[in-house]
């Protein structure tokens, strides 16, 4: 009798775990590179209304700060490192981002559609 | 390079300068010496260099969420310190000299954390260019100009606060610090959304057509209260909660100490 609620809770926790895992798995991953103070590619098309895992690789030896006012994100990425930034869900539209340390060259945008 | 450097340094300096000057003005108002402030500057500067030198390792910690967790932690820590600081200021208004060393320590830690957060970015940015002599000159010049503008705005606010009629100083300082503290919470929430620790949602509204975040006023408002053109419902809720908690705490402290202060007067 006493085991029943425990088993029930266990099942419930497993269910939540699977739900989380499946949500995590369904989340699209998008890769972006920084090379010679440029974002490659400089335009990324992503599905609208979906949460996205953005992975930014800094291939330069120097640090860069990924920054976007429209996406409300900012993160310093040291030279030769990668950064994971979750973005979205986004309404359809264009979301510019830039490298704060080299804003003249490091420009890009995310297009949600 | 010059203009980029001015903008980056100005943004970072301004964010810390507002908090620094309000606390420094308050310290002067209460009649504390400024030793705590100088110590906070030194510790914050030293901390920035250590943080900056270890950023790669910190960023990679906790599955690549170390940078956000540390920064969010610093923001929440500053919020808590400001809550204690402002409450003690209100208490001191009615009971001069009450727990001044605790007040000094809270202000010291708040200033140190704020410098640590903003200073590390300045350090990383400047350190990148120190190996490129061709660019370093103009970067440094830009940095000095940016820092100069930032400190000037701070100085302006400092003298403005000290020039206020004394009976308004406490109220206005508490309001400003509550706004700054709310901004700290809102930045922490945003960082936790960025690493998926808090759920992300569609923005509740978008005021970027009215006031762009990268405009001059937008930047000033960002430094003061973390102005965000398109916040999510969770951000708005937690921001409002952080303001409400602080305002209610201060209101309650004020009420309790004012009535205590008046008891002997009524009894006589």
Image (tube, coloured by chain):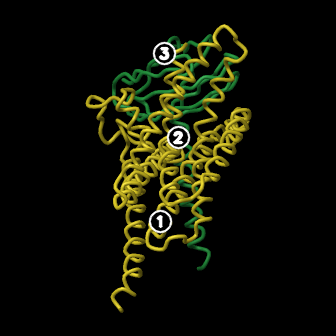
Q: Is residue B232 above or below residue A27?
A: below
Which residue shows up at 50% across the image and 71% down it?
A: B96
Which corner quadrant holds the N terminus of chain B? top right
Picture colour for chain A:
green
Which residue shows up at 38% across the image and 49% down it?
A: B163
Do marks 2 and 3 share a subunit? no
- Chain letter of disc 2? B
Mark number displayed over residue A107 = 3
- Chain letter of disc 3? A
Query: Could you tell me how far apart the alpha carbons at marks 1 and 3 are, in whole angstroms?
Result: 45 Å
A51 or B135, which is in the foreground? B135
Relative to A34, B29 lies left or right: left
Do marks 1 and 3 share a subunit? no
Secondary structure at badge 2 equals: helix
Expressed as whole percent of the image width and height from the top left, the position of residue B243 reads 39, 56
Expressed as whole percent of the image width and height from the top left, the position of residue A99 reads 53, 21
Expressed as whole percent of the image width and height from the top left, the position of residue A69 reads 42, 29
Q: Which residue is mark 2?
A: B16
Secondary structure at badge 1 equals: helix
Q: Is residue B110 above or below residue B250?
A: above
Determine crowd level at label 3: few under 14, some 14-19, many 20+ residues with C-alpha closer than 10 A.
many
Determine crowd level at label 1: few under 14, some 14-19, many 20+ residues with C-alpha closer than 10 A.
many
Q: Which residue is mark 1?
A: B87
Picture colour for chain B:
yellow
Which residue shows up at 59% across the image and 49% down it?
A: B73
A22 or B119, which is in the foreground? B119
Say which label, 1 or 2, has the lower sequence index: 2
């Amino acid at each position: 009798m006493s085991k029943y609620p425990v088993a029930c809770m266990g099942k419930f926790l497993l269910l939540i775990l699977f739900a989380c895992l499946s949500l995590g798995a369904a989340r699209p991953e998008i890769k972006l590179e920084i090379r010679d103070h440029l974002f490659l590619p400089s335009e990324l098309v992503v599905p609208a209304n979906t949460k996205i895992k953005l992975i930014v690789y800094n291939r330069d030896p120097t640090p860069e700060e990924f920054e976007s006012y429209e996406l409300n994100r900012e993160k310093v990425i040291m030279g030769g490192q990668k950064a994971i930034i979750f973005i979205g869900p986004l309404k359809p539209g264009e979301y510019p981002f830039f490298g704060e340390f080299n804003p003249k060259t490091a420009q890009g945008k995310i297009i949600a559609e | 390079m010059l203009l980029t450097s001015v903008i980056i340094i100005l943004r970072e300096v301004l964010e810390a300068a507002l908090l620094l000057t309000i606390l420094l003005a308050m310290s002067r108002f209460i009649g504390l010496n400024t030793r705590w402030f100088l110590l906070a500057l030194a510790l914050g500067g030293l901390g920035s260099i250590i943080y900056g030198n270890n950023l790669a390792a910190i960023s990679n910690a906790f599955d690549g969420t170390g940078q956000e967790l540390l920064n969010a932690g610093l923001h929440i820590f500053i919020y808590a310190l400001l809550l204690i600081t402002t409450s003690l200021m209100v208490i001191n208004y009615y009971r001069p000299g009450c727990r001044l060393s605790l007040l000094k320590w809270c202000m010291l830690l708040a200033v140190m954390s704020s410098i640590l957060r903003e200073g590390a970015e300045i350090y990383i940015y400047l350190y990148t260019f120190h190996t490129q002599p061709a660019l370093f000159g103009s970067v440094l010049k830009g940095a000095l100009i940016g820092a100069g503008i930032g400190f000037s705005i701070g100085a302006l606010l400092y003298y403005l606060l000290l020039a206020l009629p004394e009976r308004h100083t406490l109220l206005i300082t508490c309001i400003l610090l509550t706004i700054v503290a709310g901004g700290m919470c809102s930045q922490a929430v945003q960082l936790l959304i960025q690493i998926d620790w808090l759920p992300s949602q569609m923005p509740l509204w978008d005021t970027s057509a009215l006031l762009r975040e990268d405009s001059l006023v937008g930047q000033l408002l960002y430094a003061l209260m973390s102005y965000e053109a398109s916040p999510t419902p969770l951000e708005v809720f937690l921001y409002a909660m952080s303001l409400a908690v602080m305002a209610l705490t201060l209101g309650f402290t004020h009420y309790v100490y004012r009535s205590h202060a008046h008891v002997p007067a009524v009894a006589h």
